[in-house]
Amino acid sequence: GLYTLSLVSRSLVAADLPGVEVRVGQTTRALLWLDAVVGGEIKGTALTRTGDPLVDVTVTVDDDSGREHQAVTDVSGRYVLEHILPGNWTVRASNPHYLDQVIAGVHVDNQATTSEINFALAPSGAIAGRVLSNDSPVVDAIVYLRDGETMVSLASTNADGKFLLNDLPPLAY
């Protein structure tokens, strides 16, 4: 019979070869010419909640192979992620002084730019402290922060009994 031979790969443009004939007792050889995927771009900005540009925000997308693509925002808060394989991706913006923000379902086409993937980051807070018992540090104690019944963050105390809970959204806990 006649078949269509298809090839799909994340790093190559899909290809079809129609009219492939299979005969009893024979091996049919087929040659597919493939084009490499150049990938697309994701562009946008990272701003504060008041609209000021944020410098040094790391914007990241992970592809299916586990390879990470990163860009860092410039003085205007702009970033460009290049050579992103076609598909739907989750993009993350992070900076030590702000809460991470994630945008899921960002669609990228080959040799195209997906623009206006913009982030508005909220500042984060931290709680630091020290755990003592009879004026001596308590080592390896677990300190956790709850919002009602939901655990928000946890840390363990160090040799001095100190702990740090960071990347916290502003709230009275």
Image: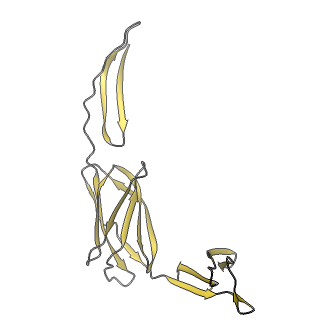
Left or right of 159 on screen, residue 110: left
Quadrant for residue 103, please give it: bottom left
Residue 172 seen: no
Which residue appears farthest toward the bottom when viewing the image?
135
Left or right of 49 on screen, residue 114: left
The front one of 43 and 134 is 134
Q: Residue at x 33, y 50 (%)?
A: 85
Q: Quadrant of the C terminus?
A: bottom right
The front one of 46 and 131 is 131
Residue 17: x and y in percent read 30, 25
The front one of 28 and 72 is 72
Q: Is residue 4 above or below residue 139?
A: above
Residue 140: x and y in percent read 67, 76
Q: Quadrant of the N terminus?
A: top left
Residue 136 seen: yes
Residue 138: x and y in percent read 70, 83
Q: Residue at x 44, y 70 (%)?
A: 101
